[in-house]
Amino acid sequence: MTAQYTVFGNPIAHSKSPQIHSLFAAQEQAQISYTRTLVENNREAFQAALNQFFANGGCGANVTLPFKEHAFSLCDALSKRAQAAGAVNTLIPQSNGTILGDNTDGIGLVSDLRDHLGITLSGCRILILGAGGAARGVILPLLSCEPERIVIANRTHSKAIDLANQFGIHAQEFATLKPEFDLIINATSGSVSGDIPPISPPIFSGCLWAYDMFYSAKSTAFLQFAAQHGAQNTADGLGMLVAQAAAAYQLWRRFTPQIAPIIATLRAELSA
């Protein structure tokens, strides 16, 4: 029987997960089925869809917006990464019938930064812009790489303070930031609408990398702004998307996909 996987979300038609996981399966020389599951936007509908999928023999699932926090509350057990993130994007059925929830977003980011882009995270001075779920999900994996410092800045400063206290990092207001960062990560949702965080242009002076967790066919407004004001290199989140999917695939199937050729394929399609 073909192994069944899916991604739950709303909206979900745009998801590249079926294509990505099909390419992983081709690397493994395996036959899988990976579908998109559109779910009505409430906890009860998501729980019903999740229960039905696994009752029908589902071998694993991904969870995207807006259900990551619902998944967190519904899992029988959680990885340390998921506990720290407060959200689950990967569901792994266990032999005893329970569901383990994990979060691969952060290790996907680390994989893209370190393994694909070649960024040295040990001793790195990192600034994270934004204090929502995207930021929270990546802090613990970044800390595991032993950076010199992680600073978080957010429009609502109290949210940045809350995250800083949770993870033992630093929170600063935008106005107090200085040009002292090697890596600046945009974890806000602003790039969806072309908005740029209220960051002073000189902050990018001496910055080795500016990274936007959002990806698009053209350079995002944030990355354009960063490059114009001194960032030496820029990258968007397409590699993170592929790498977090690869981590989920490995958890389900104990096969580690090669992400570079998949990133290249998707980038070519975006640019076409």
Image: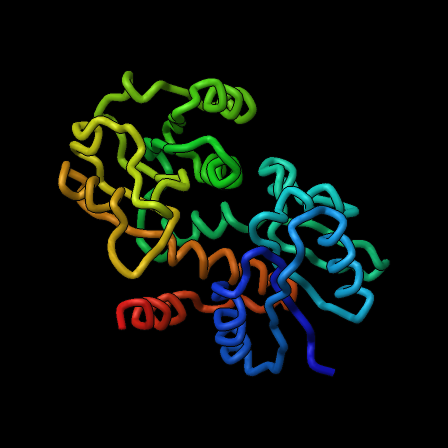
Q: Quadrant of residue 56?
A: bottom right
- Residue 255 image offset from top left, x and y in percent: 58, 69
Q: Quadrant of residue 258?
A: bottom left
- Residue 18 image offset from top left, x and y in percent: 54, 70
Q: Residue furthest right?
A: 96
Q: Is residue 180 above or below residue 76?
A: above
Q: Is residue 51 above or below residue 179?
A: below
What colouring does the structure picture have? rainbow
Name the residue: 68% across, 56% down: 91
Name the residue: 53% across, 26% down: 167
Q: Is residue 102 left or right of residue 154?
A: right
Q: Is residue 216 left or right of residue 39?
A: left
Is residue 225 or residue 120 the one in the foreground? 225
Name the residue: 14% across, 38% down: 230
Is residue 201 or residue 142 the one in the foreground? 201
Q: Quadrant for the C terminus, please.
A: bottom left
- Residue 243 image offset from top left, x and y in percent: 46, 58
Q: Is residue 12 above or below residue 105?
A: below
Name the residue: 65% across, 50% down: 41
